[in-house]
Image (tube, helix red, strand yellow):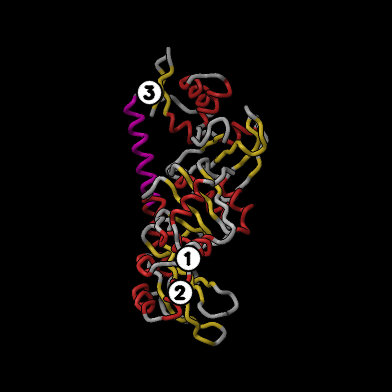
Amino acid sequence: MFIRVTPETVSYDLDEIKDAVDLLDLIGSDTALRKVTVGGGAYAGPCPWCGGTDRFVVRPQGRASEAPCWWCRQCTGEKPQSCIDYVMRRDGLDLSHAAAKLADQWGIQPVEDARDLAGAKRERERAREAARLADAIERRARSAQSLADPEHGPYDADAQGAALLAEPLALADLAARGIALDVAMAYQVGATRRFVQGSRVPALSIPWRQGGETVAVQYRFLEAVKGRYQWHPGTAAELWNADELSRRRDSAVLVVEGALKALTVISAGIESVVAVSNKQGAPRVVGENAGALAAYERVYILLDPDARAEARTAALSIPNSRIVELPEKVDDWLVRRGMDVGLLLCALRYARRP
């Protein structure tokens, strides 16, 4: 999109302005901001207009598909705002003059012809697509290398899927968690035996996929051993079912703690679910995926009961988030209530803002 500044015949590329302006530099002189998530996440502080303590949130680093943004949970609700919106509100300017002011401050040249703008936008899209393709190729190569295992042999999803049907401990564990067998098979959950302390111990195998590729495999041991979870050698991941964020099959998405809990929720009837690998990394992982999550009308953060602080910090990264608090872990909660998805949907209605 471009804007023409009147009465002069000068046009600016609004996307270029939004990408170029340092949002922290622009806003930091008006309010005290503190970092609330790591990894290029969010900053929070008092709103320059309505006060508060952390209701005003700034995301200074946009991903490939998003520009840096800000919002106030009271003044602007759940709609992310741009640097141009900020200057319009702060200085009482209309869109064209706010854009011109920022362009002048950040040395952005006007667009002489709309065709120049169209060409620049096409070039940016080509660069973004090339970056996405390069990332996919690199991820596929890393996946092929990392899933080799000299001690146990390479990861084989088909063989472990077949082994699941022949492993009574694995089937019993899934049933106890309320995970339907067809759901487990659809998400390529398998069974295997791993060497632990000199013995071969049965385990569930849970692939973590991204971009259609298996990037990591997590094992959950079915017998009492030190450390019930283990990653396939050389692999680790932080967001399970990450591809759900690009499919967006629903208007809302649920973020839970642990892939097996996510599978329980899916078995209950809610498919739009992703999982963080642990509570400690939840704020950072949610912050790093805030652009994709913000595309939903609502994001529900439902971590374990001992992760209330982490849930709140994670929720601050997304303007449309709500925190869901249950008295126990979501899989235990559902199983105790007969996997009644209606009760979970009722709990979501009582979710609160951070």
Residue that mark 3 sits on? 112
The spot of residue 336 in percent (x, y) is 51, 64
Whether label 1 touches label 2, CB < 8 Å = yes
Looking at the figure, which quarter contains the N terminus? Answer: top left
The residue located at (54%, 48%) in the rendering is 287
SS category of the residue bearing label 2: strand
Crowd tier of the residue under label 2, counting other residues whose Cα lies within 10 Å: few below 14, some 14–19, many 20 or above = many
Crowd tier of the residue under label 1, counting other residues whose Cα lies within 10 Å: few below 14, some 14–19, many 20 or above = many
Residue that mark 2 sits on? 204
Residue nearest the observer in this picture, 203 or 8: 203
Rendered image: mark on residue 124: none
Q: Which residues are magenta?
A: 114-132
Sequence order check: which comes first, mark 1 or mark 2?
Answer: 2
The spot of residue 322 in percent (x, y) is 53, 45
Residue 40 visible in the displayed image:
no
SS category of the residue bearing label 3: loop
Mark closer to the observer (2, 3): 2
Residue that mark 1 sits on? 260
Question: Would you identify the image quadrant in which residue 90 lies?
Answer: top right
Crowd tier of the residue under label 3, counting other residues whose Cα lies within 10 Å: few below 14, some 14–19, many 20 or above = few
Question: Would you identify the image quadrant in which residue 267 lies?
Answer: bottom left
Q: Magenta stretch containing residue 249, yes or no? A: no
Mark closer to the observer (3, 1): 1
Sequence order check: which comes first, mark 3 or mark 1?
Answer: 3
The residue located at (36%, 41%) in the rendering is 125
- Give, as a three-letter code, the residue at label 2: Leu
Whether 112 is drawn above or below 7: the answer is below
Residue nearest the observer in this picture, 346 or 272: 346
Sequence order check: which comes first, mark 2 or mark 3?
Answer: 3
